[in-house]
């Protein structure tokens, strides 16, 4: 078990709370759907996503994927497509060194049993399967993107997702699920300093984001962060630094009028090592 799993932290509305009840990983593959086309092993995620009309899925790509973590990251990404409610739009954005300028790899609406699909179960199952296969193909492109690039810019991906959310009208629920190692390491902001608490960067980062107009405006969206790791071995990250990453992200998301619902190594119900 990793040091992060041993800490067992998850950030919710009440603050820092233990992450418990993580069972076996979902064995369903997005590229190889089951006979029912979609599956959802995480009751927690199903509850979080069931009413969402829009889900922005931000996933580490290329060299921003930690060593040996891609199977777990892919399983968590696939769980989002399995747990989102029918009719929800899912947009997949890669987290790279230049996330803000990256185009979405996938955008699609979870098929709903309406129209012809309502009277023809076989057609509906076929549409669901096609949706899962297309999303799975997009996930499989992520490891090959931006190979050799230096840095990771999850803030840029969050800003791009916020741009999508601003275009939406109404009061429907919107959720951002970000799957990455937790570290912002870009030219404008590098959270890692040897032996330093990452949360000390919060104040300067918020001032800079506001001054440049780059603070992600989340319009009341819920945000889920999963996949936190120590980063590369040479970073020599301490347990305290890992825990304070959640403090940083909670502050940034709150400043952008969003709510951090989870900050953890894995989604509840999904193993860190499927």
Image (spheres, rainbow, N blue to C red):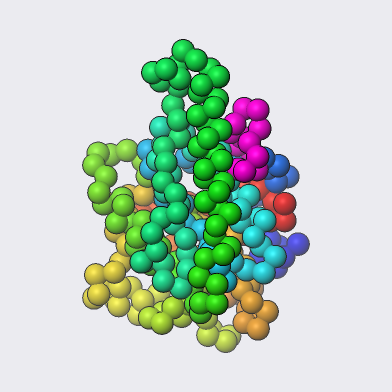
**Quadrant location of residue 180?**
bottom right
Residue at horizontal 41 percent and vertical 67 percent from the top: 99
Residue positioned most to the bottom: 194
Compared with 51, 116 (above or below) is above
In the rendered view, does 42 fall on the left or right side of 199? right
Could one spot residue 244 in this view of the protein? no
Q: Is residue 60 above or below residue 48?
A: below
Give whichever of 200, 273 is nearer the camera: 273
The reply, left or right, for residue 256 in relation to residue 178 is left
Q: Where is residue 228 in the image (x, y as percent from the top left)?
A: 59, 64
Name the residue nearer the viewer: 83 or 71: 71
Quick one: 99 or 257, which is closer to the camera? 99
Q: Residue at x 45, y 20 (%)?
A: 117
The image shows residue 80, relative to residue 116, as above or below, that is below
Question: Which range is magenta?
Answer: 29-41
Q: Is 253 placed left or right of 171 in the picture?
A: right
- For the question of whether residue 215 can be seen, the reply is yes
Which residue corresponds to the image point at 23% horizontal and 76% vertical from the top-left?
211
Seen from the viewer's position, the closer of residues 192 and 123 is 123
The x, y position of residue 172, in whole percent, is 32, 38
The quarter of the rendered structure image containing the N terminus is bottom right
Q: How far across and how far down the image is residue 32, in percent?
A: 65, 40
Which residue is located at x 71 percent, y 42 percent? 27
Among all residues in the image, which is located at the extreme top? 119
Q: Main secondary structure of the magenta part?
A: loop
Q: Is residue 198 magenta?
A: no
38 in the magenta segment: yes
Residue 166 at x, y = what percent?
26, 51
């Amino acid at each position: 078990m990793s040091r992060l799993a041993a800490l067992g932290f998850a950030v919710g509305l009440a603050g820092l709370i233990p992450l418990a009840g993580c069972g076996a990983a979902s064995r369903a593959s997005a590229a190889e759907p089951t006979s029912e086309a979609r599956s959802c092993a995480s009751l927690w995620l199903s509850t979080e996503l069931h009413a969402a009309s829009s889900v922005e899925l931000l996933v580490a790509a290329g060299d921003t994927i930690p060593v040996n973590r891609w199977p777990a990251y892919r399983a968590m990404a696939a769980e989002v497509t399995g747990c989102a409610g029918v009719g929800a739009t899912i947009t997949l954005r890669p987290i790279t060194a230049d996330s803000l300028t990256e185009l979405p790899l996938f955008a699609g609406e979870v098929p709903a049993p309406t129209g012809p699909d309502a009277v023809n179960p076989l057609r509906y199952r076929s549409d669901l399967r096609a949706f899962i296969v297309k999303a799975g193909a997009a996930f499989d492109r992520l490891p090959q993107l931006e190979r050799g690039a230096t840095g990771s810019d999850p803030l840029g991906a969050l800003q791009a997702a916020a741009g999508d959310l601003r275009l939406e009208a109404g009061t429907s629920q919107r959720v951002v699920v970000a799957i990455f190692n937790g570290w912002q390491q870009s030219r404008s902001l590098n959270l890692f300093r040897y032996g330093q608490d990452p949360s000390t960067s919060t104040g300067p980062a918020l001032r800079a984001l506001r001054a440049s107009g780059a603070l992600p405006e989340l319009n009341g969206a819920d945000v889920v962060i999963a996949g936190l790791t120590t980063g590369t071995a040479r970073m020599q990250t301490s347990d305290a630094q890992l825990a304070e990453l959640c403090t940083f992200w909670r502050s940034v998301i709150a400043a952008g009028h969003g709510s951090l619902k989870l900050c953890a190594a894995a989604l509840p119900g999904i193993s860190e090592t499927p």
